[in-house]
Image: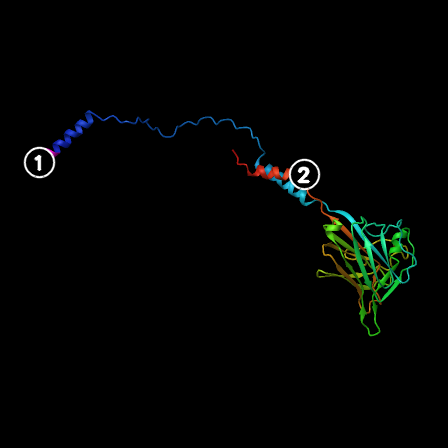
Amino acid sequence: MKTYRRILGSFSNNSQSLGENPIASPIAREPHNGFQPTHTARPPRKRRLFPSRPTKFAAAGLALGMIATSQAVVVSTASVDFLGNFQAGALVASDIAGVIPANQWGAAGGNIGFLPQPDTSASDVINFTWNAPSSAVIGGSIPTPGDNLMMEGYIASQTSASGVVVPAAVRVTSIDMGALGWSYYDVFVYSDTGTNGPTSVINLSNPGITTYFHTENVPGFGVGGFNTYLDSQASPPGNYVRFNGLTTSMFDVSVSHIPGAADMAAINGIQIIGHKIPEPSTGLLTILSTSLLLLRRKRS
């Protein structure tokens, strides 16, 4: 019991000694008063040295849009007029014909033949080979003699004695896109027999098969004062069809009539229009690269 009281007494004495002679703390601490009740004035906003983020996005979008909408330009053309066996004259250098006006048309005479035709820039030669069971001409005259002459003669399909439709066919080969400087090309197939609006089928193959049902315009190009090109894909009846965006080195065109609708379907001419997509200008690339760099900057 005495020992217990002695221990308690020593705790009491130690407590008093701690209270009377506190040990100095080696680290001085400031009193914490919590959050200040009043707000300090906000510093003035720094002037922005770079465009805002929406502006950056708009600039990048504008540059990309301008690059994407760069218009392709026509580099050169290769055009062939099919005379068949009955067209009296051929186009000369002063004659202009076609939906895409051209004055260098190769003359493909006869129902069967082969013609190496250079493009208008003399960059390369494209080969045309044709085979048709028939040919004919459309009479008439219009104020534009080049168009009239190109649409006058044609090679044509025919129904055989056994009732089989034999198409008129053209094979185009040796299209060297690099030598020609083309990014892609379009093909115009002119088809107009002027025989009471027959329905014909125009196929372009390799790669794949692309088919257009083509209805002739009555009475035919250059006849009865009719002298307008009509796209049968857009406003039938017409006198030509168009195949867009080709890049293959060769293709085949075949034209045949629907049995019972008429006895022939025509190929009057073929135009190949080579396009080049221009490279983005230095200015557009600078705008795009600057916009992309600005987008990566963090807001300060």
Viewer-side label of 2, 1: 2
Q: Give the residue type at disc 1.
A: Thr
Toward which corner of the image does residue 270 lie, by quadrant?
A: bottom right
Is 6 one of the magenta-colored residues? Answer: yes
Q: In which quarter of the image is the N terminus?
A: top left
The residue at the far left in this view is: 2
Q: What stretch is highlighted in magenta?
A: 3-7
Query: Which of the two labelled residues, at mark 2 and mark 1, occupies the earlier sequence position?
Result: 1
Disc 2 to disc 1: CB gap under 8 Å: no
Vertical placement of residue 111 versus 91, above or below: below
Give the residue at the far bottom of this rendering: 162
Q: Main secondary structure of the magenta part?
A: helix
Residue at image mark 2: 282
Q: Does residue 14 appear to the left or right of 60 in the view shown?
A: left
Indicate the colouring scheme.
rainbow
Q: Distance between the residues labelled 2 and 1?
A: 99 Å
Residue 252 versus residue 199: which sits nearer the camera? Answer: 252
Dot 2: within a 10 Å radius of its alpha carbon, few (fewer than 14), some, or many (20 or more) residues?
few
Determine whether the residue tagged by mark 2 lies in a helix, strand or loop.
helix
Residue 3: mark: 1
Camera-side residue of 250 and 38: 250
Rendering coords of residue 271 (x, y %): 80, 54
Q: What residue type is labelled 2?
A: Thr
* Location of residue 293 in the rendering, given as x and y in whole percent from the top left corner: 58, 38
Q: Position of residue 45 (x, y in %)?
A: 52, 28
- Frontmost residue, 120 versus 158: 120
Residue 223 in magenta stretch: no
Q: Where is residue 105 in the image (x, y as percent from the top left)?
A: 85, 53
Looking at the rendered structure, which numbered label has been put on residue 101? none
- Badge 1 density bin: few <14, some 14–19, many ≥20, Cα 10 Å: few
Task: Quadrant for residue 85, please give it.
Answer: bottom right
